[in-house]
Image (tube, rainbow, N blue to C red):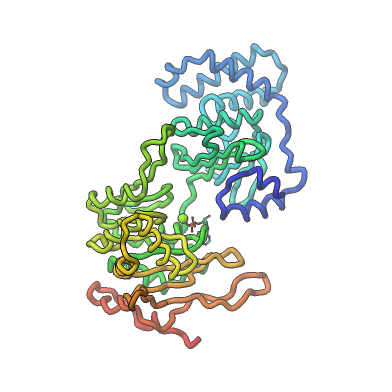
Amino acid sequence: MSILLQRSGYLLREKEERLDQAVQSLPEEDVYAPADPFLDLKARVHERLIHELDVARLAEQDPVTVRANVEEASRTLLAAEDVPMARQERLRIIGEIADEVLGFGPIQPLLDDPTVSEVMVNAPDRVYFERAGVLHLSDRVFKDAAHVMRVIEKIVAPLNRRIDERSPMVDARLPDGSRVNAIIPPLAIDGPTLTVRKFAREPYQTEDLIRFQTLTPEIVEVLRACIAMRLNVMVCGGTGTGKTTLLNVVSSFIPPTERIITIEDPAELQLRQRHVIRLETRPANIEGEGQITQRDLVRNALRMRPDRIIVGEVRGGEAFDMLQAMNTGHDGSLTTVHANSPRDALARVENMVLMAGLDLPARAIREQISSAINLVVHLNRMRDGSRRVTHVTEIVGMEGQVVTMQDIFVFQGRGLDDQGRVLGSVHPTGLRPKFSERFDEYGIHLPASLFEGAAA
Ligand SMILES: Nc1ncnc2c1ncn2[C@@H]1O[C@H](COP(=O)(O)OP(=O)(O)O)[C@@H](O)[C@H]1O
Ligand SMILES: [Mg+2]
């Protein structure tokens, strides 16, 4: 099992466990892909085809015509090979050769299939895909490791990225928005590995998160109010706890009339509003030049007359520019940060500001933080895999050197049920948030009982 996981190389961490379970549940005979007796033939025809095709002319035609022409040419070449095969077989091979020439080879049909959410090439003959949360072994195979490499190169070349021994891993995005990670030897011990996380899935909506018990309708109301009041909200939690998903949901409360600028590395948010400008960082090119950081983008965004700035996840020096922006009238901003608790989130932001290299005293940074950030929502991934909001915490001010916070909602666990599911829910603490004093000003009518703690 662990060998398969090692082979799959770098997978997003939150995926690993599921992959683990899924591969374990594969029947033994499924683990070996059938050998394709026509691999050599296909490679031969493909090579001849590349020589004979008039690429310049193909580029002028529409995709359907191009595909028809390539299929016609491979039909002719295949006939010349004079290998006996059934008609079905012949059609399949022609299609596969066309995929090779025009697309990303053996995985192209999986990429085209809307029911497939993820494609993983662990080895030339181990192509897995995920459909409806379940992992399957595909019958599509690569000829050899060099074939996998060619497809990886075909993916990264148009992006002006390079993958070779000196830079053996690369993150990229396909034209349709799918995310690709490739990692090759020497880092991937058993050969080049490719992971494609397809971008198609409808993101979770507010109702989904309520159904999953990630949050309650009451918390949704409070978050709606915070957006209406243009408070600055930060979502925190560990990797894969659902920060980006929650950020997406909270962003949906922003009125469609506002101009939203999103800054991400890489772009993941799927906002429904129309007045959205999406910015994404850029890694350095082959010559090591041209890198654009989140910090560059935040600074640029400020010159774009934003009503809201959303930074997908703050990780570095951009934290400083964001705090400044929040403190100078660009309120109503949203972001996420990787942290273990609301308090930890603030500590991390403080560290990031230090990374910006401005030599500010800690107290000054904390003052900035306490006046900029209004609300922190913390997520946790529970033992049963569910994601829960564990804290909704208001930043109140400063006391001496310390930023003061008060919890408005906290999760109270009651152990596990007999099926191993987490029991418990997120309750109001009984503390009324300070910002509720301004509800009237914004025409917000939330019942005071919303914040009244049940006697715990
Ligand atoms: N509330 C939730 N309940 C169940 N699964 C979730 C929830 N939020 C996110 N997920 C799933 O968890 C994975 C990671 O979500 P994501 O929002 O990207 O996390 P993060 O930004 O914290 O790394 C995704 O596969 C997503 O579909
Ligand atoms: Mg995220």
**Is residue 123 shown above or below 321?**
above
**Is residue 100 shown above or below 429?**
above
Residue 127: give x, y in percent of width and height.
64, 39
The single residue placed furthest to the bottom in the displayed view is 455
For the residue pair 447 and 331, the one nearer the viewer reads as 331
For the residue pair 291 and 102, the one nearer the viewer reads as 291
User: Image quarter for residue 227?
Assistant: bottom left
User: Image quarter for residue 439?
Assistant: bottom left
In this picture, residue 237 sits left or right of residue 441:
right
Residue 38: give x, y in percent of width and height.
69, 24
Residue 181: give x, y in percent of width and height.
53, 42
The residue depicted at 53 percent of the width and 39 percent of the height is: 169
Residue 79: give x, y in percent of width and height.
64, 14
Marks counted in the figure total 0
The residue depicted at 59 percent of the width and 26 percent of the height is: 95
**Is residue 359 shown above or below 44?**
below
**Is residue 426 shown above or below 345?**
below
In this picture, residue 245 sits left or right of residue 279:
right
The single residue placed furthest to the top in the displayed view is 80
For the residue pair 307 and 1, the one nearer the viewer reads as 1
The residue depicted at 40 percent of the width and 73 percent of the height is: 393
